[in-house]
Image (cartoon, grey):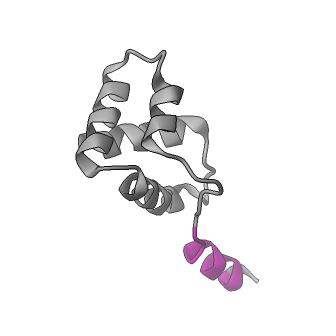
Amino acid sequence: MKELARFLLQNAQIDFSGDITIEQVRQYLRDDDSREARSLLAKLIEDKGVDDMLVTIADVLKEYLPDGISEDVIRQQLSSYSES
């Protein structure tokens, strides 16, 4: 069972249900004047949308599955993505 659980955990895929647009991201961040929020918006504009961000964040979050994914972890990864 341990080996099967390890295999399943290592091969799990994360997908976000629902569509999100750059306009919706702007709405979520409208009251956030932080450097991270501005950096993320700039990165999304440079990338011409949110598709690359969603794929990257989903891929990186796989590393956190064994310990758990929290809002803080997602915020940290969004910040890292915007600085890449």
Residue 34 rendering spot, x and y as whole percentages: 37, 18
Residue 44 rendering spot, x and y as whole percentages: 32, 43
Residue at 23% across, 45% down: 46
Give the vertical position of 28 relative to 44 (above or below).
above
Give the vertical position of 70 relative to 59 (above or below).
above
**The N terminus lies in which quarter of the figure?**
bottom right
Residue at 52% across, 36% down: 24
Residue at 61% across, 41% down: 70
Outermost residue, right side: 1
Q: Main secondary structure of the magenta part?
A: helix
Residue 40 rendering spot, x and y as whole percentages: 34, 36
Left or right of 33: which side holds 6? right
The magenta segment: 3-13
The image quarter in which residue 80 lies: top left
Give the vertical position of 26 relative to 43 (above or below).
above
Residue 25 rendering spot, x and y as whole percentages: 48, 36
